Image: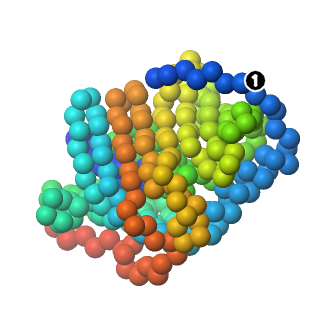
Amino acid sequence: MKMSLWKVNILLLLLLSLFGCNVIRPKPEIMPIPEVKSILLDLKSRYDLVETMRTLVNFKIEQKGKSDEVRGYMNYARPDKLSIYIMGPFNEPRVIASAVGDSLKLFFVTENELIQGQLTDTVIKDIFDIDIRVSDIKSAIFANPFLDGNTDDLKIESYGDEYVIKRSSDQEGYIEEINISAKNTTVNRWRIKDVNGKIIQDISFSKYKVIGGVMRPLKATVNRPLDSTTISLESVDPEINAKIDSEVFNLTIPENAKV
């Protein structure tokens, strides 16, 4: 079963709430291993400092010349709880999502329709016909592509004010390029390219700010050229390590909901 276009867009928002010019660069320098470990340690330490997070998020979707804007409320609790409420123009819930562990529930309020299942790459592909890795969800939320544990055989270059890390992706022949600021060890860009060098997914992170003692990007922009889709997500007044009621992650579904 394939979803309607707007529902696919909503899914992209949920999964990635998680966040044309050539530049001539100087010859890169190969970085020593201790410095590489320091970068990974800095990124991981920020993740370890976050137990909970909640924020209002503004979403903007641009696809094939059409544009739409929605807003929602996101709650996250370690290690594996996420809830998102996408709101309508009158502040009414439009879509409610809950992901706890590897279980996913999406409830479309107006349609009274429920989608539920295991949160796996295969399920997302089969139902929504889009290629998004579950590991990208957490990585996008924390602006840390290395949370998936893929840190072997990294190729790292230094351009003075920026590091560029290259690694093999999950799909054979695909390459990931990750741009990191040398000044404050923040991930600025994360691209996935196919065997021909064509960009499959391009995520940029910006508007970094210290929130609750943790450096975080307030804005993430996701570009998927093959889908002609660009999605921008911007956090408003995020809170780190605030107390979140566990009931926020329990999605109550009407008995007559279409499954």
Q: Position of residue 6 (x, y in %)?
A: 23, 43
Q: At numbered mark 1, what does the secondary structure look like: helix, strand or loop? A: loop
Quarter of the figure with the C terminus: bottom left
Left or right of residue 129, residue 120 in this image: right
Q: Identify which residue is drawn at 34% across, 29% down.
A: 228
Vertical arrangement, residue 182 with respect to residue 250, above or below = above
State the residue in front, 153 or 177.
177
State the residue in front, 171 or 241.
241
Left or right of residue 173, residue 208 in this image: left
Q: Position of residue 8 (x, y in %)?
A: 30, 43
State the residue in front, 158 or 74.
158
- The reply to whether residue 89 is visible in this rendering is yes
Quarter of the figure with the N terminus: top left
Q: Identify which residue is drawn at 64% across, 44% down.
A: 181
Mark 1: amino acid: Lys
Res. 226 image quadrant: top left
Residue occupied by mark 1:
27
- The reply to whether residue 78 is visible in this rendering is no
Left or right of residue 99, residue 88 in this image: left
Q: Identify which residue is drawn at 62% across, 69% down.
A: 49
Instruction: Please rate how many residues cluster around mark 1, counting C-alpha atoms within 10 Å: few if below 14, some from 14 to 19, many from 20.
Output: few
Tell me how many marks there are. 1
Q: Position of residue 241 (x, y in %)?
A: 52, 75
